[in-house]
Amino acid sequence: MNRNFLFPMVSAFLLILGTGVPSMAGEPTEQIKQTTDKILSILADPNLKNPARAEERKQSVRRTIDGRFDWEELARRSLAQYWAQRTPDEKEEFIQLYRELLARTYLNKVQDYSGETVRYEGENIESDYATVKVRILTAKNTEISVDYRVMKRRSNWLVYDISIEGVSLVNNYRSQFNSILQKSTYEELVKKLKEKSLTEKP
Protein backbone atom coordinates (compact mmCIF):
# COMPACT_ATOMS: atom_id res chain seq x y z
CA MET A 1 0.00 0.00 0.00
CA ASN A 2 1.23 3.42 -0.98
CA ARG A 3 2.80 5.24 1.95
CA ASN A 4 3.89 8.40 0.16
CA PHE A 5 3.38 11.72 1.91
CA LEU A 6 -0.23 12.37 2.80
CA PHE A 7 -1.44 9.10 1.32
CA PRO A 8 -5.13 10.01 0.92
CA MET A 9 -6.71 6.64 1.76
CA VAL A 10 -9.14 7.33 -1.05
CA SER A 11 -10.47 3.81 -0.96
CA ALA A 12 -11.28 4.20 2.73
CA PHE A 13 -13.68 7.01 1.99
CA LEU A 14 -15.12 5.41 -1.10
CA LEU A 15 -15.84 2.32 0.94
CA ILE A 16 -18.40 4.16 2.99
CA LEU A 17 -20.47 3.97 -0.19
CA GLY A 18 -22.37 0.87 -1.16
CA THR A 19 -25.52 -1.11 -0.57
CA GLY A 20 -26.14 -3.92 1.81
CA VAL A 21 -28.02 -5.09 4.84
CA PRO A 22 -26.41 -5.51 8.28
CA SER A 23 -26.36 -9.15 9.32
CA MET A 24 -25.97 -8.13 12.96
CA ALA A 25 -27.35 -4.60 13.11
CA GLY A 26 -26.64 -2.82 16.36
CA GLU A 27 -26.68 0.94 16.88
CA PRO A 28 -23.13 1.64 15.56
CA THR A 29 -23.77 -0.37 12.39
CA GLU A 30 -27.14 1.24 11.85
CA GLN A 31 -25.63 4.70 12.08
CA ILE A 32 -22.85 3.87 9.61
CA LYS A 33 -25.51 2.51 7.25
CA GLN A 34 -27.64 5.65 7.68
CA THR A 35 -24.70 7.76 6.55
CA THR A 36 -24.09 5.42 3.61
CA ASP A 37 -27.72 5.62 2.53
CA LYS A 38 -27.81 9.39 2.83
CA ILE A 39 -24.71 9.85 0.64
CA LEU A 40 -26.12 7.45 -1.94
CA SER A 41 -29.39 9.37 -1.93
CA ILE A 42 -27.54 12.63 -2.62
CA LEU A 43 -25.54 11.04 -5.45
CA ALA A 44 -28.68 9.54 -6.98
CA ASP A 45 -30.77 12.73 -6.77
CA PRO A 46 -31.42 13.69 -10.43
CA ASN A 47 -31.97 17.33 -9.48
CA LEU A 48 -28.53 17.59 -7.91
CA LYS A 49 -26.88 16.13 -11.02
CA ASN A 50 -27.54 19.41 -12.80
CA PRO A 51 -24.11 21.09 -13.31
CA ALA A 52 -25.59 24.32 -11.97
CA ARG A 53 -26.13 22.57 -8.63
CA ALA A 54 -22.73 20.88 -8.46
CA GLU A 55 -21.59 22.97 -5.50
CA GLU A 56 -24.83 22.27 -3.62
CA ARG A 57 -24.31 18.54 -4.23
CA LYS A 58 -20.74 18.66 -2.95
CA GLN A 59 -21.75 20.58 0.16
CA SER A 60 -24.55 18.11 0.90
CA VAL A 61 -22.10 15.21 0.74
CA ARG A 62 -19.59 17.13 2.86
CA ARG A 63 -22.17 17.90 5.56
CA THR A 64 -23.11 14.23 5.67
CA ILE A 65 -19.47 13.20 6.10
CA ASP A 66 -18.98 15.83 8.79
CA GLY A 67 -21.92 14.42 10.69
CA ARG A 68 -20.32 10.98 10.97
CA PHE A 69 -16.59 11.69 11.35
CA ASP A 70 -14.99 13.05 14.50
CA TRP A 71 -12.39 15.26 12.84
CA GLU A 72 -10.87 16.46 16.11
CA GLU A 73 -10.31 12.91 17.32
CA LEU A 74 -8.87 11.86 13.96
CA ALA A 75 -6.52 14.86 13.97
CA ARG A 76 -5.47 14.37 17.60
CA ARG A 77 -4.68 10.69 17.13
CA SER A 78 -2.84 11.31 13.87
CA LEU A 79 -0.65 14.05 15.34
CA ALA A 80 -0.08 11.89 18.46
CA GLN A 81 2.50 13.25 20.93
CA TYR A 82 2.83 16.49 18.97
CA TRP A 83 -0.82 17.38 19.63
CA ALA A 84 -0.19 18.43 23.24
CA GLN A 85 2.53 20.84 22.07
CA ARG A 86 0.10 22.85 19.95
CA THR A 87 -1.76 25.97 21.04
CA PRO A 88 -5.59 26.02 20.87
CA ASP A 89 -5.43 28.09 17.68
CA GLU A 90 -2.91 25.70 16.11
CA LYS A 91 -5.10 22.72 17.02
CA GLU A 92 -8.13 24.33 15.41
CA GLU A 93 -6.16 25.16 12.27
CA PHE A 94 -4.79 21.62 12.07
CA ILE A 95 -8.25 20.07 12.46
CA GLN A 96 -9.59 22.21 9.62
CA LEU A 97 -6.63 21.46 7.34
CA TYR A 98 -6.93 17.73 8.04
CA ARG A 99 -10.68 17.80 7.41
CA GLU A 100 -10.28 19.85 4.25
CA LEU A 101 -7.65 17.55 2.80
CA LEU A 102 -9.66 14.39 3.34
CA ALA A 103 -12.99 15.93 2.35
CA ARG A 104 -11.55 17.30 -0.91
CA THR A 105 -9.99 13.94 -1.70
CA TYR A 106 -13.30 12.23 -1.08
CA LEU A 107 -15.29 14.70 -3.17
CA ASN A 108 -12.84 14.29 -6.05
CA LYS A 109 -13.27 10.53 -6.05
CA VAL A 110 -16.93 10.13 -5.11
CA GLN A 111 -17.95 10.10 -8.77
CA ASP A 112 -15.99 6.86 -9.20
CA TYR A 113 -18.56 4.93 -7.21
CA SER A 114 -19.82 2.05 -9.35
CA GLY A 115 -22.18 0.10 -7.13
CA GLU A 116 -19.80 -1.99 -5.06
CA THR A 117 -21.61 -4.43 -2.77
CA VAL A 118 -21.19 -3.92 0.96
CA ARG A 119 -21.87 -6.48 3.64
CA TYR A 120 -22.12 -5.42 7.27
CA GLU A 121 -20.72 -8.38 9.17
CA GLY A 122 -21.23 -7.41 12.76
CA GLU A 123 -19.80 -5.18 15.43
CA ASN A 124 -17.84 -5.33 18.66
CA ILE A 125 -18.86 -2.88 21.38
CA GLU A 126 -16.81 -2.08 24.48
CA SER A 127 -18.40 0.67 26.54
CA ASP A 128 -18.32 3.85 24.39
CA TYR A 129 -16.14 2.34 21.67
CA ALA A 130 -17.08 -0.01 18.87
CA THR A 131 -15.79 -1.57 15.67
CA VAL A 132 -18.17 -2.01 12.76
CA LYS A 133 -16.98 -4.79 10.47
CA VAL A 134 -17.65 -4.46 6.76
CA ARG A 135 -16.73 -6.52 3.73
CA ILE A 136 -16.78 -5.03 0.23
CA LEU A 137 -17.16 -7.02 -2.96
CA THR A 138 -15.60 -5.00 -5.79
CA ALA A 139 -16.50 -4.94 -9.46
CA LYS A 140 -13.47 -7.19 -10.03
CA ASN A 141 -14.97 -9.78 -7.68
CA THR A 142 -12.36 -9.28 -4.98
CA GLU A 143 -13.16 -8.82 -1.31
CA ILE A 144 -11.84 -6.08 0.97
CA SER A 145 -12.27 -6.04 4.73
CA VAL A 146 -12.90 -2.69 6.38
CA ASP A 147 -13.24 -1.85 10.06
CA TYR A 148 -14.88 1.41 11.08
CA ARG A 149 -13.71 2.35 14.57
CA VAL A 150 -16.29 4.54 16.23
CA MET A 151 -16.80 6.19 19.59
CA LYS A 152 -20.01 7.33 21.23
CA ARG A 153 -20.62 11.05 21.60
CA ARG A 154 -23.96 11.44 23.34
CA SER A 155 -26.28 9.43 21.07
CA ASN A 156 -24.00 9.45 18.02
CA TRP A 157 -21.36 6.91 17.03
CA LEU A 158 -18.61 8.88 15.27
CA VAL A 159 -15.76 7.48 13.18
CA TYR A 160 -12.29 8.09 14.64
CA ASP A 161 -10.37 5.63 12.46
CA ILE A 162 -10.80 3.32 9.46
CA SER A 163 -8.77 0.19 8.88
CA ILE A 164 -8.58 -1.40 5.42
CA GLU A 165 -7.10 -4.89 5.26
CA GLY A 166 -5.47 -4.17 8.61
CA VAL A 167 -3.99 -0.79 7.58
CA SER A 168 -5.19 2.06 9.81
CA LEU A 169 -5.81 5.53 8.38
CA VAL A 170 -4.74 7.11 11.68
CA ASN A 171 -1.57 5.04 11.97
CA ASN A 172 -0.69 5.80 8.36
CA TYR A 173 -0.99 9.55 8.84
CA ARG A 174 0.69 9.41 12.24
CA SER A 175 3.72 7.72 10.66
CA GLN A 176 3.90 10.34 7.89
CA PHE A 177 3.43 13.30 10.21
CA ASN A 178 5.98 11.91 12.66
CA SER A 179 8.52 11.45 9.87
CA ILE A 180 8.13 15.08 8.80
CA LEU A 181 8.22 16.47 12.35
CA GLN A 182 11.36 14.51 13.25
CA LYS A 183 13.20 16.08 10.31
CA SER A 184 11.57 19.47 10.13
CA THR A 185 9.15 21.79 11.97
CA TYR A 186 5.46 21.88 12.69
CA GLU A 187 5.21 24.95 10.47
CA GLU A 188 6.60 22.91 7.58
CA LEU A 189 3.97 20.21 8.15
CA VAL A 190 1.22 22.83 8.08
CA LYS A 191 2.69 24.24 4.87
CA LYS A 192 2.63 20.80 3.24
CA LEU A 193 -0.97 20.23 4.34
CA LYS A 194 -2.01 23.55 2.83
CA GLU A 195 -0.19 22.78 -0.42
CA LYS A 196 -1.76 19.32 -0.61
CA SER A 197 -5.24 20.72 -0.02
CA LEU A 198 -4.78 23.17 -2.86
CA THR A 199 -3.80 20.41 -5.27
CA GLU A 200 -6.90 18.37 -4.38
CA LYS A 201 -9.47 20.42 -6.27
CA PRO A 202 -12.97 20.13 -4.78
Image: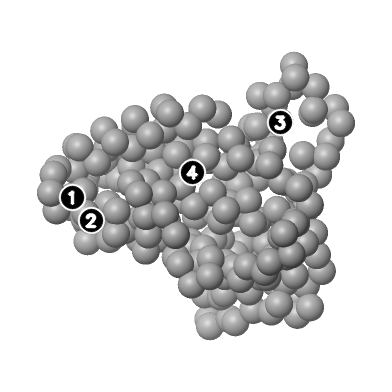
Q: Distance between the residues labelled 2 and 3?
A: 35 Å
Which numbered disc flags the more N-terminal residue, 3 or 1? 3
Is 52 situated above or below 137? above
- Label 1 crowding class (10 Å Cα cut-off): few <14, some 14-19, many 20+? some
Query: Where does the image place residue 126, in percent across and percent down from the top left?
Result: 53, 83
Q: SS for tag 2?
A: helix
Q: Determine which of the numbered discs, if any, sits on residue 178 in the image.
A: 2
Q: Which residue in the structure is indicated by mark 1? A: 181
Query: Which quadrant of the structure image shows residue 154?
Result: bottom right
Give yes or no for contact between labels 1 and 4 (Cβ–Cβ under 8 Å): no
Q: SS for tag 3?
A: helix
- For image coordinates 70% across by 24% down, the residue present is 54
Q: How far apart are marks 1 and 4 (CA)?
A: 20 Å
Which numbered disc flags the more N-terminal residue, 4 or 3? 3
Give yes or no for contact between labels 1 and 2 (Cβ–Cβ under 8 Å): yes
Give yes or no for contact between labels 3 and 1 (Cβ–Cβ under 8 Å): no
